[in-house]
Image: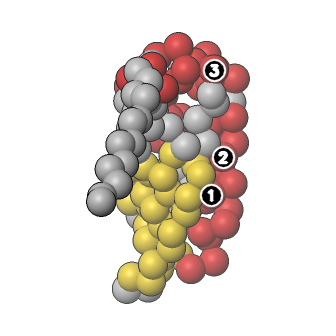
């Protein structure tokens, strides 16, 4: 004599609960201020390459304003600076990494930059 077991699984509509972290709705982007949430620093030649990932992709307006703000207030010694929607990177002398991160944090916190979102 055998025993049969039947297991039933009730499926819910999972699509209503899915979140795409790299393509959030624009409404969500407007409510979350951009910031650098992950930072890495690597030795290169006579300096450091720093790469930071944003907590959410920058809107094109935010990236453009961050680049423009950076170009107006360049820090001495920063050899290269690049902004993409997902990250920021720069090359700077060894002792200037922390000051450059603080500068980027200030630029992202500037109300005129946040209004772009």
In the picture, which quadrant includes the C terminus? top right
* Residue 89, horizontal then vertical, whole percent: 43, 57
Gap between marks 1 and 3 measured at Cα: 23 Å
Residue drawn at 30 percent across, 58 percent down? 2
Q: In the structure shown, which secondary structural element does the residue marked by tag 1 occupy? A: helix
Residue drawn at 53 percent across, 14 percent down? 27
Q: Earlier in the sequence, mark 3 or mark 2?
A: 3
In front here: 29 or 98?
29
Q: Is residue 7 above or below residue 94?
A: above
Residue 31 got which mark?
3
Which residue bears the numbered disc 1? 101
Q: Is residue 29 above or below residue 56?
A: above
Residue drawn at 66 percent across, 66 percent down? 98
Local crowd size for mark 3, using a 10 Å CA cut-off: few (<14), some (14–19), many (≥20)? few
Which residue bears the numbered disc 2? 105
Asked which quadrant contains residue 10, the reply is top left
Gap between marks 3 and 2 measured at Cα: 18 Å
Q: In the structure shown, which secondary structural element does the residue marked by tag 2 occupy? A: helix
Q: Is residue 64 above or below residue 46?
A: above
Is residue 94 found left or right of 63 in the rendered image?
A: right
């Amino acid at each position: 004599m055998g025993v049969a077991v039947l297991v039933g699984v009730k499926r819910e509509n999972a699509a209503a609960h899915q979140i795409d972290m790299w393509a959030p709705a624009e409404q969500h982007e407007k409510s979350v201020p951009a910031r650098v949430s992950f930072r890495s620093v690597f030795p290169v030649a006579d300096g450091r390459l720093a790469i930071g990932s944003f907590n959410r992709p920058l809107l094109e307006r935010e990236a453009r304003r961050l680049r423009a703000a950076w170009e107006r207030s360049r820090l001495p010694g920063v050899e290269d600076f690049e902004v993409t929607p997902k990250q920021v990177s720069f090359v700077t002398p060894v002792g200037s990494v922390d000051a450059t991160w603080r500068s980027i944090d200030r630029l992202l916190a500037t109300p005129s930059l946040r209004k772009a979102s």
